[in-house]
Image (spheres, rainbow, N blue to C red):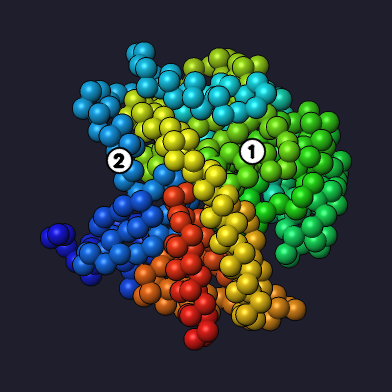
């Protein structure tokens, strides 16, 4: 049993010693002390179904024994910087990761986070093209350092960062966007921005396939092929940010960009890649990767032995336990049940996403699509009381984000939907 400080004591320390910008979702925040697969346990041993942790950390499930063993064994043997010596862990994981990509995408740079991965991708694109201009989608999230905060396009995540040369194009959002699900129409804005906002040449276009922080917005079908075409014509590189949508989460495909049938020039990833271990990666072609030899480039701990040992174990677990297939089967089942819930409750304006990356948007008026900001907080809190943890996002903060560990079961899906049904009924 847990004998550490109580939630109240931790909260008090947090208020005194930790960043005042740290946020928590719940009225009385949860002190989680243990994790097993898709479950979290609080200080009293109460179990919660974790329908959000899949994005934050785990794709294989909390404390997956294979991943834990890989971390422990490598830690006992050696932990060191990535740069100075040879080590098998980084080479083996790079090889295994590269095998997951189409085309000539086979050179891997490791980082410690998604932000670092996107910063590096943007740097590489600028070096390769000799251009400065970056195009990203409104409502996107790509990180919180200089270039990535510039590319991120939601005011709530931006600190007045200097973002010269970043252009934010119309978001191909099938629910709120003006062109509905017509991806090609939205993509015309990419061409317009190139024509009217740049010299005609750009460094890169960066986008998620399904916007995570933005509230699980799946790009309208046909958008990426058309946008990529305009960008390539302008000499730019196409960057796919797979920090949330990668590693089988969409169920139908291993990478989110594959759902739109495109092949990017650079792919970035983090979060689920190490099942909770700080790790990120940039994958590109040998020709593009070459630009980083113009100067010295290194990252002290990006791809260190312990983190890459974890990464390799994650890939093996995804395969062994058929987690992508599970994401497809259980995710499809869950989406159907959520859609049925939409027929029952006026408060649900939209159900979307794919696999285990699903969104439920709450609105107080279906016609006007008025964000149900207060209602969502209440439902979220009540679901926690019933033992279900769920995420929230979107510009208006009114979208449930359901991104569980990929080992989520149909019974878990039933429990989640029952809990949501009951709490919404009581609103
Ligand atoms: N890209 C996407 C799509 C993300 O969701 C995030 C994190 N929310 C990042 C990049 C940044 O990752 P990190 O927090 O690891 O820096």
Q: Residues within 10 Å of mark 1 (few under 14, many from 20)?
A: many
**Sequence-first tag of 1 and 2:** 2
**Is residue 92 something one can see in this rendering?**
yes
User: Looking at the picture, how far across and down is residue 119, in whole percent?
Assistant: 55, 36
Disc 2 residue lies near ligand 1 with CB under 8 A: no
User: Looking at the picture, how far across and down is residue 393, in whole percent?
Assistant: 54, 63
Left or right of 6 on screen, residue 151: right
User: Looking at the picture, how far across and down is residue 347, in whole percent?
Assistant: 61, 79
Left or right of 76 on screen, residue 51: right
The residue shown at (58%, 46%) is 251
**Is residue 133 something one can see in this rendering?**
no
Q: What residue is pinned by disc 1?
A: 240
Q: Are marks 1 and 2 in contact (CB under 8 Å)?
A: no
Left or right of 397 on screen, residue 177: right
As drawn, 151 above or below 11:
above
Q: What residue is pinned by disc 2?
A: 65
User: Looking at the picture, how far across and down is residue 162, in whole percent?
Assistant: 60, 46
The residue shown at (55%, 44%) is 325
The residue shown at (68%, 32%) is 264
SS for callout 1: strand
Q: Please name whichever residue, 236 or 207, is drawn nearer the observer in this view of the structure.
A: 207
Quadrant assignment, res 316:
top left
Quadrant assignment, res 194:
top right
Quadrant assignment, res 345:
bottom right
Q: Quadrant of the N terminus?
A: bottom left
SS for callout 2: helix
As drawn, 113 above or below 382:
above
């Amino acid at each position: 049993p847990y004998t550490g400080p109580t939630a109240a004591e931790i909260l008090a320390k947090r208020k005194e010693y930790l960043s005042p910008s740290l946020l928590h979702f719940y009225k009385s925040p949860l002190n989680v002390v243990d994790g097993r697969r898709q479950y979290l346990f609080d200080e009293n041993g109460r179990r919660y179904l974790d329908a959000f942790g899949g994005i934050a950390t785990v794709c294989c499930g909390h404390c997956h024994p294979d991943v834990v063993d890989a971390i422990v064994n490598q830690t006992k043997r050696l932990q060191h910087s990535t740069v100075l010596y040879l080590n098998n862990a980084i080479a083996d994981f790079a090889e295994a990761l590269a095998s997951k990509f189409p085309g000539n995408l086979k050179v891997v740079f490791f980082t410690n986070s998604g932000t670092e991965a996107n910063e590096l991708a943007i740097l590489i694109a600028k070096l390769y093209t000799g251009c400065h201009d970056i195009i990203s989608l409104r409502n996107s999230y790509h990180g919180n350092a200089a270039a990535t905060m510039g590319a991120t396009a939601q005011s709530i995540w931006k600190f007045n960062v200097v973002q010269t040369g970043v252009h934010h194009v119309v978001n191909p959002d099938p629910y709120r966007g003006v062109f509905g699900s017509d991806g090609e129409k939205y993509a015309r804005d990419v061409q317009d921005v190139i024509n009217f906002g740049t010299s005609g040449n750009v460094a890169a276009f960066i986008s998620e396939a399904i916007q995570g922080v933005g509230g699980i917005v799946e790009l309208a079908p046909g958008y990426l092929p058309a946008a990529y075409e305009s960008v390539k014509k302008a000499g730019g590189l196409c960057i796919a940010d797979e920090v949330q949508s990668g590693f089988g989460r969409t169920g139908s495909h291993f990478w989110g960009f594959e759902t739109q049938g495109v092949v990017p020039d650079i792919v970035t990833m983090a979060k689920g890649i190490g099942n909770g271990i700080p790790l990120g990666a940039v994958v590109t072609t040998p020709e593009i990767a070459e630009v980083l030899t113009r100067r010295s480039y290194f990252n002290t701990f990006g791809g260190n032995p312990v983190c890459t040992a974890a990464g390799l174990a994650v890939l093996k677990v995804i395969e062994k336990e058929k987690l992508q297939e599970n994401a497809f089967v259980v995710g499809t089942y869950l989406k159907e049940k959520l859609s049925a819930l939409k027929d029952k409750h006026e408060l649900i304006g939209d159900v979307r996403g794919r696999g285990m990356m699903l969104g439920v948007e709450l609105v107080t008026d279906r016609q006007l699509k008025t964000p149900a900001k207060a209602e969502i907080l209440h439902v979220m809190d009540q679901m926690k009381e019933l033992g279900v943890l769920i995420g929230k996002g979107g510009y208006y903060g009114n979208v449930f984000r359901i991104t569980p560990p990929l080992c989520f079961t149909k019974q878990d899906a039933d429990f989640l939907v029952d809990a949501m049904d009951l709490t919404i009924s009581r609103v």
